[in-house]
Image (spheres, rainbow, N blue to C red):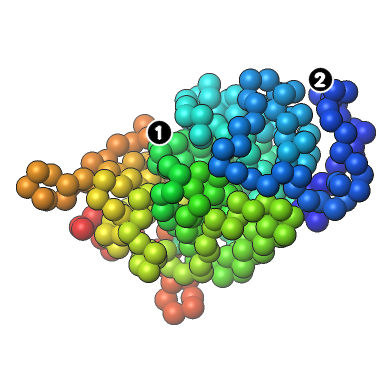
Amino acid sequence: MLRRDFVLGSLTFAGAALLPRISRAEVQAGKVPVPFTFDMTPPLATRDAFVEWAIKNRGEDPKFLAQRWNRLQALIANKDVWDDKDKIAFALNPREDFCRPINRAHAYESAFLDIGYGVTISGPHAVARMTQSLDLKRGEKVLEIGTGSGYQSSYLSRMTDKVFTIEIIKPLAERTRGIYDDLIARGYTEYKNISTKQADGYYGWEEHGPFDKIIVTCGIDHIPPPLLRQLKTGGTMVIPVGPPGAQRVLKVLKQQGADGSITVARSDIFNKIVPFVPFTKLEGDVIKGAHNGEGKDKL
Ligand SMILES: C[S@@+](CC[C@H](N)C(=O)[O-])C[C@H]1O[C@@H](n2cnc3c(N)ncnc32)[C@H](O)[C@@H]1O
């Protein structure tokens, strides 16, 4: 069981007494009471109002909901999110379901967390600012490289119905696919918006391109030319670029000049070094080394 393992009578935060009652049978069935829609608007003005709404509509654990709302306030204060669509996507996104059971209690802390296989779920501030910088709109097609825990794609699936994500580590890709399928079975229909694949994401996902947006969640020393090619003109890519362990997260805009030439404008979305796990390389079925040194940012 992924969640719903909370005791109904153990609410401790202010206003708990006012919360709507969910029957024990509903909790045990583990079904989401109200299926996701893109126009869902949880009240975000106060923690109690949000928690009350989310228990009733999403059937989620009030302890995690309160922590999620608290983290959202920190994201807003830190200017990691500013659009309502991004605030709502964060507020609806159950990070606890994408953390390993041993780390679930830390799901809403600011740090990245271990998810096994030598990789991590990125911290909530990094995920939020990278997503906000993409400025993903409903109906746009987005490609993620580095599915990992599945949390980033889960976030994206609340903004568009066309999410494509690639993970290189086979057992991790399978585990995360299983998490999505379990959640879909419980009524989280939004995960039907996500298509997953196990492969080396350096080469993108040609059959589904071109993409309006691309987000890369592993670090590399150049922008992979195949990804740049699969990005639409006018599209945005967010990608950690730099030497191992010392990347800067770039927002890359692919533009076309009046003379038809393609140019790429880059800006640093954090203005500091943010280390990411390496953008590794598949040789046959085996992960061997990384793609560093392979490209010259050519189109
Ligand atoms: C920071 S972690 C996971 C972040 C992830 N977006 C999340 O929400 O948990 C980066 C992921 O990129 C994956 N990765 C590294 N190189 C890759 C490649 N060439 N193709 C696809 N995935 C890759 C790693 O295995 C790892 O799972």
Q: Residues within 10 Å of mark 1 (few under 14, many from 20)?
A: some
The kind of secondary structure element at disc 1 is loop
**At which x and y percent is residue 246?**
40, 44
Asked whether 277 or 260 is in front, the reply is 260
Seen from this angle, which residue lies furthest bottom? Answer: 284
Q: Tell me residue 47's x, y (percent).
A: 70, 23
Direction from residue 44 to residue 275 in the image, left or right:
left
Residue 79 percent location from the top left of the image: 47, 25
Q: Quadrant of the N terminus?
A: bottom right
Residue that mark 1 sits on: 270
Residue bearing mark 2: 14
Quadrant of residue 283 within the rendered picture: bottom left
- Counting residues from the start of the chain, the first of labels 1 and 2 encountered is 2
Position above or below: 5 against 198: above
Depth check, mark 1 against mark 2: the one in front is: 2
**184 relative to 82, above or below:** below
Rendering quarter of residue 271:
top left
* Left or right side of 229 for 55: right
The residue that appears at 85% across and 53% down in the rendered structure is 29
Q: Is residue 259 left or right of residue 174?
A: left
Q: Could you tell me if the residues under marks 1 and 2 are in contact, i.e. CB atoms within 8 Å?
A: no
Amino acid type of the residue that numbered disc 1 sits on in the rendered structure: Phe
In front here: 279 or 22?
Answer: 22
Residue visible at 67% across and 43% down in the picture: 94
Q: Tell me: residue 11, above or below residue 274.
A: above
Q: CA distance from mark 1 to mark 2?
A: 35 Å
- Residue 231 is marked as none
Which residue type carries mark 2? Ala
Q: Secondary structure at mark 2?
A: loop
Q: Give the position of the C terminus as an image quadrant.
A: bottom left
Examine the rendering and report whether any part of residue 288 can be seen.
no
